[in-house]
Image: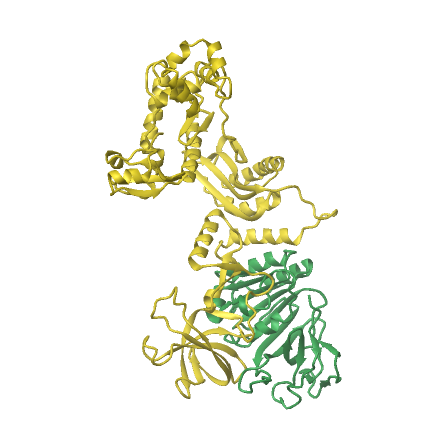
Amino acid sequence: MARGLSLVAGGAVRARSGPAEIHRLPPGLGDRWHLPAPSSPTLSELFAAHPRDGGWAGFLLAQLDTDKPLLWIQDRMAILESGRIHPPGLPVQNLIHVETRDARDALWAMEEGVRCAGLSAVIGELWGDPKALDFTATRRLAVAAERSGTPCWLVRLGGTANLSGARMRWRSASAPSLIHPLDPKAPGLAAWDAELFRARGSPPGRWSIAHEADRFHLVAASGDRALGGIERSRA
Amino acid sequence: MPHLAIERWAESNDRAPDSPVVLTVEGAHGLIIHAVTKAAAERGARVGARLTDARALDPSLVAIPADPASNAALMQKLARWAGRWSPLVEVDGADSLRLDATGVAHLFGGEERLVADVRRRFESLGLTARIAIAPTAGAAWALARHPSNSLDPLPVHALRLEPNTVRTLERLGLKTIGAVMEVPRLALARRFRGGEGVVDALDRLTGRKDEPLTAAPRKLVPRAALRLEEPATYPEAAAQALERLIPDLVCQLQQRHLGVRRLSLAGFRVDGSVAAASVATSIPSREPKHLQRLLADKVAALDPGFGFDAFALTAEWTEELGAAQNSLVEEASGEHALARLIDRLTVKLSPRAVRKPQARESHLPERASGWVAAVSSPALAREVAREARRRGPSTAYGDSPPHEIVGRIRPQRLLDRPEAINVIYATPEGMPRRFVWRRAVHDIARVEGPERIAPEWWRQPSSARLRDYYRVEDGKGRRYWIYREGVIGDGRGGPPNWYIHGLFG
């Protein structure tokens, strides 16, 4: 499990908790900041801002270690509404894809996967607010993940943030991408707005980030892109 | 079975029996006729003749290459099937079977009725069989090929000797077995001193020398059975039986160094019907806990009906599995844990729901990323192989994607079926400006493209249109993969349609 996200200086972090609280990152290379991450593998919940927004996948995949196979579970509605995963576009090919009829089967498969020692992570995509997904189910997943040390991500497409046993709850949306170095009209490096709205052991916050190769770049929060938005570190 | 090759061919090809067909094999001087149909025989084709000679007699002969491997496979199958008459069956040569009928004839009501039964059953298979029963295997061999009441008038071919030896015997005027037998043994032994073995052949024929059968090794399937004194009608009976049978089966597997790939529990009901549940595993296993966990759900659903009176747990498909120890301390290795996980998921969901990516050589995105079942079974493996043959060469993903083409960016999610969208563009060939997908309007802020993917003309119909893929980003930063199918004036339909195919992360 990657211990948090390595943030490289080059922008500003605006935390939502305090009104005027702006962390200015120290300039220069090699200064790493970390996005909050659990101290040990556990259950994290990730809400896609919109079911037709695939941005969360990039945000999530960048945080995974992929030395072992990945178990990716999608329920049928999630596949219909926002597509099936497409291995050529993923950074990892060593994965097992499970398609389930409904959320109940998906949760069962996630729990089985989380108990397995041979996986790098378990990702489960659920559509909407299924009845089977209640506090007990998420709590079971969290406990199982902590016991086995397999990180588990519960991805909610088009769902509402109801009661959950997840240790960290994120909300993620696509942000306008960085400027393409060669073609200003083309979409550049993907960027995301990520909001941590509930977490155990770390204050909630909001970040605008981009990721390239093995590290994240911090860009200005959306809205004031002029603030060194594309100033990148060359590493 | 003198006509095995041609009968097998006729059976498998479903051709009219009166067509003049000859099966051929490669000979030293061209093709040699191996088997003929009746119609071909009437036109002068003879087994062992050269095809050109037979064609000279009748040019309408149809020559088809013979398939000795399939014939041999059929013989093996027939040998196994012939186990119904005798436990000791041997495939003898290319077209005959030898059965040791010692002590089994009375089970069928005497030797005549045994022979009649064998003949009837071979006839029902559509195979011509010549059957002989004799005290020695050599005599039976001779009588099956040369029907007769006694051995004496049979030609010396029936001794099963080398052709050269047969020729020598015939030159000496010894044309029948009876004539050979009249010659003093000493003289025969002196004349045929080398490896010809005329005396040996005679001894085998008369039983003075033993000719034992070597039956094919019979592979017993690991199986554990449980018989109940009283029929069990309660639904938990099957689960309890499973619990008792698994240690027994695992013990057998351990002794034979096997691991199970497919396991089934059959419950035999009082009324003669059988209820069965079976599971497959992704790697060979003989761990009792795992096997029990796999079968438990399916077994619990078996309906006892009027009650089970016996259970059998059978390892239907096994593979070699040596003893394995990963470390000194007991800990599950990742690979095994993963295989077990795949098994459980597959059993509960279905083999089609649990899959691994498999890349294919194709430029069409939906074809390039194929999926194969994570757990394989013989039927599924055949299906995958058939699919692979149909679809052309494929390679499994390693750690890296197969094509590392610069500038080729693929979305992380692909819609199973591209959805039609309405697009507003500046010029028909130009960049898209705005599109409507699922009734939501997306203003395109940035766009890159097109990446042109041509249809696969060797596979698709000629009306298939090319695709121009664009990577677009809307005002909110959501990135999509859309394409225009066809271009104006390509002569393959009206104005081009637009589709959305993927979502970028």
Q: Examine the rendered structure and indicate whether residue B415 appears above or below residue B449.
A: above
Image label count: 0
> Taking the image as drawn, is residue B23 in sight?
yes
Location of the C terminus of chain B (image quadrant): bottom right
Chain given the colour green: A
> In the figure, residue A161 lies in which quadrant?
bottom right
Q: Examine the rendered structure and indicate whether residue A204 appears above or below residue B353.
A: below
Q: Nearer the viewer, residue B330 or A47?
A: B330
B32 on left or right of B360: left
Chain given the colour yellow: B
Q: Nearer the viewer, residue B170 or B352?
A: B170
User: How far across and down, in percent of the image, does residue B128 sit?
Assistant: 32, 30
Location of the N terminus of chain B (image quadrant): top left
Residue furthest toward the bottom? A226
B401 on left or right of B117: right
User: How far across and down, in percent of the image, does residue B377 sit?
Assistant: 50, 48
Q: Residue at x 46, y 48 (%)?
A: B379
Q: Nearer the viewer, residue B104 or A36?
A: B104
> In the figure, residue B468 lies in which quadrant?
bottom left
> Taking the image as drawn, is residue B107 in sight?
no
